[in-house]
Amino acid sequence: MWDTFESRLEITADLVAETGLRVGMGGEAAEPTASDLPLIKDAQGNPFIPGSSLRGVLRSHVERIVRTLENSAGDGKGACNPVVEKEWCITKDQMAELRDQARREGDLWLAEQVWEKSCRVCQVFGSPWLASRVKVADLHLIGETTVEVRDGVSIHREKETVANKYDFEAVPAGTRFRLRIVAENLDEEERGLLWLGLRELERGHIHVGGFKGRGLGQVKLEKLAIKGLDAADPEALKAYLLRGEMKPIPLEEADRWLEALLTKIGAGGE
Ligand SMILES: [Zn+2]
């Protein structure tokens, strides 16, 4: 498991905005003439969605579903709460203790302990102590889009008057972005966990970006495709190393990964 290359999955799709979509810079406008809330843009000046941002919403959605099915978090099960430190599957204090013990037991022992104590979701998506095995590339624009500047108002709740006017940038419905996810060394159930999130994203159940309360951020996936490499297969490894080729995986096979996961956690985690 440690430092070896066993398998790789590459998942690609078009992420299509079904409503306006806004992935912003957050802070204040750099130029006085600019929108109050600009979109985040790449070196060419085109709006894009940072991979970390998409991975975040994908993960949160997966966490919610796993929590529904599996209550306890830790020891390879369930989903801890990354937002509240004392609800992490390994807290900072627990990690300090493990590091203390690791002075006698060694680094490999520590790595194994961290692995075993982490929850199901951290084992795949990473934690402060564990590298993520799912990498989401930045999602760049397919074709062109327009950047719309929309008016926003915030309402003073008690007085029911307009408290503040501002404008914000968004891209219109129909804008497409390229999604590419690479995952390494996931077993069948771990693949199922990732696939669970992607099927939900495909169906439009996961919203992306800001202003969700105003109906922005509805997306779906099109042209979802998976390729895989099993490094234990010498011919497949050769084709990959020489020509970068990977074998297409039918989506029905991926659905079986998800079934394997659901069978496992539905049966009480054994
Ligand atoms: Zn966790």
Image: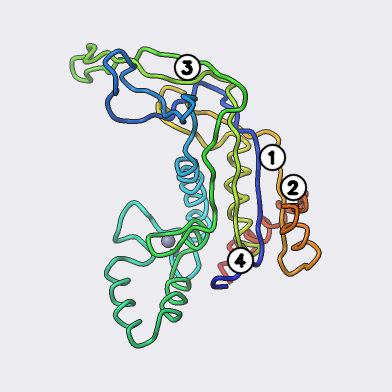
Give the Cα distance between marks 4 and 2: 24 Å
Q: Which residue does the numbered mark 4 point to in the structure image?
A: 267
Residue 192: assigned label: none
Nearest to N terminus: mark 1 or mark 2: 1
Vertical placement of residue 7 versus 23, above or below? below
The answer to whether mark 1 and mark 2 are in CB contact below 8 A is yes
Q: Which residue does the numbered mark 2 point to in the structure image?
A: 251
The answer to whether mark 1 and mark 4 are in CB contact below 8 A is no
Tell me the amino acid under the disc marked 2. Leu
Rendered location of residue 230, percent (x, y): 72, 63
How crowded is the residue under tag 4: few (<14 C-alpha within 10 Å), some, or many (20+)? few
Rendered location of residue 148, percent (x, y): 45, 14
At a point 66% along the width and 63% down the height, the residue shown is 7
Residue 224: assigned label: 1
Tell me the amino acid under the disc marked 1. Leu
Quarter location, residue 96: bottom left
Rendered location of residue 268, percent (x, y): 56, 67
Tell me the amino acid under the disc marked 3. Val
Nearest to N terminus: mark 1 or mark 4: 1
